[in-house]
Amino acid sequence: MFEIFQYGFMQNAFIAAVLVSVACGIVGTYVVVKKVVSISGAISHAAFGGIGLGYLVGINPIVAAIPFSILSAISIGLINERVKISEDTAIGILWSVGMGLGVIFINLSPQYAPDLFSYLFGNILTVPRSDLILMLILDLIILFIVFLFYREFMAISFDEEFSKVVGVPAESMYILLLCLVALSVVVLIKVVGVILVIALLSIPAAINIQYTNNIKKIMIFSVILGIFLNILGLWLSFIFDLASGATIVLVLGITFAISTLLKKYW
């Protein structure tokens, strides 16, 4: 198994697997506990608009996706809190508009988009060193914000109404949490793509939440489990010549199914 890591692109892929596991383990815990998985999906698809904008203006699509994703997160947070439409309607609007903008921007772009497929479905084997640095920076930002507002995030995740009563700025914290989801989406895009981001963001935490209700333990175990399953999926995709992002997601899904059965019958 370990001989495959003698290749430079596999070393980059290994580092990327570790970095994305940090983001999905920490933020994914809040996503599952707060039950905002569908909102995370909307933000990830809206991020495609930023990828298309990157192609249009000639910059790194991942860099362009950062402000686009954050703006989408803030928009859906404000719509959910202040506009009198249902949450699923807001999700559907953001989901479709973001994807639509991405397609339009790419059509308007004078250059060909050779790696567009990897942004949709991911390809961890093509992650360059520059994207690894960006992933690391985003991970550090996520860790810093969670460390700073850990109690506030925990309060709104379990009981938002009570958190308002005790003085927690629930709306601001909720929007900030969605911004963390947006940053996590950007970290995950090159690994599993826009389409499959939800799986990596939710499955590790969903597995661990079956065994403990302690937020810190869920985060730690989700990061560790994410690293193991991402590397396993990476190795299987390399051995059997399969799409890396899809293989990683299938490994996660199978592990969740096995964990659920074990929890139910043991």
Image (cartoon, rainbow, N blue to C red):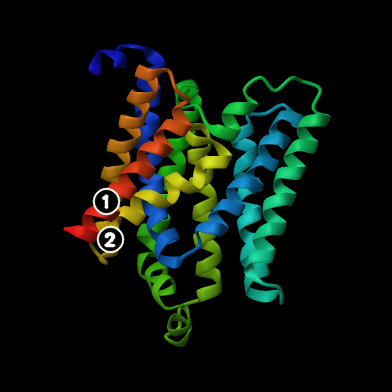
Query: Where's the C terminus, which quadrant?
Result: bottom left
Q: Quadrant of residue 77?
A: bottom right
Which label lies toward us, 2 or 1?
A: 1
Q: Is residue 204 visible?
A: yes
Could you tell me the amino acid type at mark 1? Ser
Q: Position of residue 137 (x, y in %)?
A: 45, 39
Q: Quadrant of residue 171?
A: bottom right
Could you tell me the amino acid type at mark 2? Gln
Which of these two is toward me, 180 or 239?
239
Q: Which mark is residue 259?
A: 1
Q: Which mark is residue 133?
A: none
Does dot 2 land on a helix, a strand or a loop? Answer: loop
Q: Which residue does the numbered mark 2 point to in the structure image?
A: 210
Residue that lies at the very extreme toward the left in this rendered image:
266
Q: Residue at x 25, y 13 (%)?
A: 3
Q: Residue at x 48, y 40 (%)?
A: 187
Are the two marked residues, 2 and 1, in contact with CB atoms closer than 8 angstroms? yes
Q: In terms of sequence position, does the residue under pointer 2 or pointer 1 come before the other?
A: 2
From this view, report whether residue 156 is shown above or below residue 196.
below
In the image, 56: left or right of 162?
A: right
Q: Residue at x 68, y 68 (%)?
A: 79
Which of these two is toward me, 207 or 175?
207
Q: Position of residue 237 (x, y in %)?
A: 39, 23
Disc 1 packing (10 Å; few <14; some 14–19; many ≥20)? some
From this view, report whether residue 157 is shown above or below residue 208.
below
Q: CA distance from mark 2 to mark 1?
A: 8 Å
In the image, 214: left or right of 72?
A: left
In the image, 101: left or right of 197?
A: right
Q: Residue at x 53, y 37 (%)?
A: 189
Which of these two is toward me, 66 or 229?
229
